[in-house]
Image: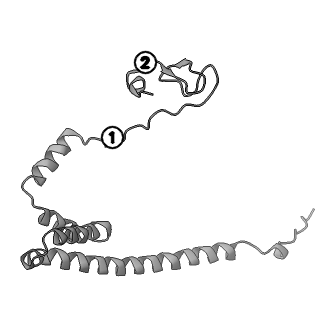
């Protein structure tokens, strides 16, 4: 069965009964069978023109090593220095020579120190957040009276 009818909006045939259906219908009008069309293609969202020009002019002329170094310098966002280490690993696998290793030394050291320090800081942040949550949780239950400790009503003097 051709997929041309999906793209151009022509009639397509049902696989079970053979009746025609349009592109917009998800099921056959005659037999009711649900028909799958081809999956939609994913399109990356386009950047606004001014941002695209600014990024394009900044990226133009940069080497892969420079971009990896910039990614290695971003603190607290772990995927960027890890991506710099992965780029180094791929580059070193392509050209396993000592000059390549020496040229990428600053990238690897910066990314490694950044990952270690970021993990250390994140561990302290998570410990502080855990302590805060425990404090708030226990404080909440301290404010709720126990079921047997309800206050007794006092009579209103007449």
Q: What residue is rendered at 44% in x and 35% in y? A: 38
Given the current orientation, which residue lies at the most extreme right position?
A: 158
- Left or right, 124 with respect to 100, comes to right
On screen, residue 117 above or below 88: below
| 78 horizontally vs 64: left or right | right
Q: From the top left corner, tell me how far across and down residue 88 is, in percent.
A: 19, 70
Number of labels in the image equals 2
Q: Quadrant of residue 32?
A: top right
- Which residue corresponds to mark 1? 43
Q: Position of residue 114 (x, y in %)?
A: 26, 76
Q: Is residue 80 above or below residue 2?
A: below
What is the quadrant of the N terminus in the image?
Answer: top left
Left or right side of 67 for 140: right
Q: Secondary structure at mark 2?
A: loop
Q: Position of residue 97 (x, y in %)?
A: 10, 76
Residue 154's image quarter? bottom right
Residue under label 2: 10
Q: Crowding near pointer 1: few (<14 within 10 Å), some, many (20+)?
A: few
Whole-angstrom CA distance, mark 2 to mark 1, is 23 Å
Q: Image point 19% across, 39% down: which residue?
A: 49
Using the image as rendered, state which of residue 12 and residue 119 is in the foreground: 12
Q: Nearer the viewer, residue 31 or 111?
A: 31
Q: Residue at the location (18% across, 44% down)?
A: 52
Describe the element under mark 1 as helix, strand or loop. Answer: loop
Tell whether label 1 touches label 2 (CB within 8 Å).
no
Q: Nearer the viewer, residue 13 or 121?
A: 13
Indicate which disc, 2 or 1, sits on the residue closer to the N terminus: 2
Q: Quick check: 21 above or below 116?
A: above
Q: Residues within 10 Å of mark 2 (few under 14, many from 20)?
A: few
The percent position of residue 128, horizontal first and vertical second, equals 46, 79
């Amino acid at each position: 069965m051709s997929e041309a009818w999906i793209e151009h909006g022509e009639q397509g045939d049902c696989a079970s009964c053979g009746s025609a259906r349009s592109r917009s219908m998800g099921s056959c009008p005659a037999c009711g069978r649900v028909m799958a069309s081809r999956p939609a293609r994913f399109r990356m969202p386009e950047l606004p023109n001014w941002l695209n020009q600014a990024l394009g002019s900044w990226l133009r002329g940069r080497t892969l090593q420079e971009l990896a170094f910039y990614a290695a310098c971003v603190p607290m966002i772990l995927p960027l220095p890890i991506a710099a280490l992965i780029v180094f690993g791929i580059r070193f696998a392509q050209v396993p020579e000592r000059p390549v290793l020496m040229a990428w030394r600053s990238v690897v050291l910066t990314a490694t120190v950044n990952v270690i320090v970021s993990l250390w800081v994140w561990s302290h942040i998570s410990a502080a957040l855990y302590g805060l949550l425990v404090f708030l949780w226990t404080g909440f239950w301290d404010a709720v009276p126990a079921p047997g400790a309800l206050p007794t009503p006092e009579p209103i003097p007449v």
